[in-house]
Image: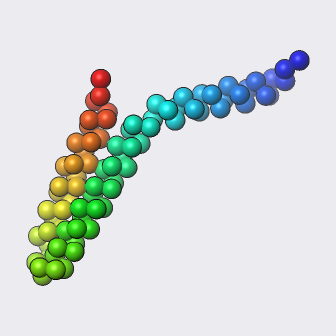
Amino acid sequence: MIDDSENYLSQSLKQFQRFVRKSGPHASAAYTLLAAVLFLGGLGFYGDYYFNSSPLFILIGLSLGLIIGFYELAKSVFKK
């Protein structure tokens, strides 16, 4: 006879796997957004340090990072 607690655990794990599988592309897009902002913001920071121009390159880097990141996020969310 199958124990109900084992059956419940098995069903719970299968449901969890389905959720993880479905959320994969959206999580990837969110990580891309974060990476783009951090990477391009960091490049802007070092560009400001190298050229001694206080907020110019970091603002450009953060803006590009946000644009690229949100583009990837929208591409993932509105995918048909």
- Residue 76 figure quarter: top left
Q: Which x, y percent locates residue 45?
A: 22, 72
Q: Residue at x 27, y 42 (%)?
A: 72
Extreme residue toward the right, this view: 1
Q: Which x, y percent locates residue 65?
A: 22, 55
Q: Residue at x 26, y 48 (%)?
A: 69
Colouring convention used in this rendered image of the protein:
rainbow
Q: Residue at x 28, y 55 (%)?
A: 36
The answer to whether 62 appears left or right of 3 in the picture is left
Q: Residue at x 17, y 73 (%)?
A: 47
Q: Which x, y percent locates residue 66?
A: 22, 52
- Above or below for 5 versus 56: above
The answer to whether 71 appears left or right of 1 in the picture is left
Extreme residue toward the top, this view: 1
The answer to whether 56 appears left or right of 42 in the picture is left
- Above or below for 35 versus 56: above
Q: Which x, y percent locates residue 74?
A: 26, 37
Quarter of the image where the C terminus is located: top left
- Above or below for 15 versus 58: above
- Residue 71 figure quarter: top left
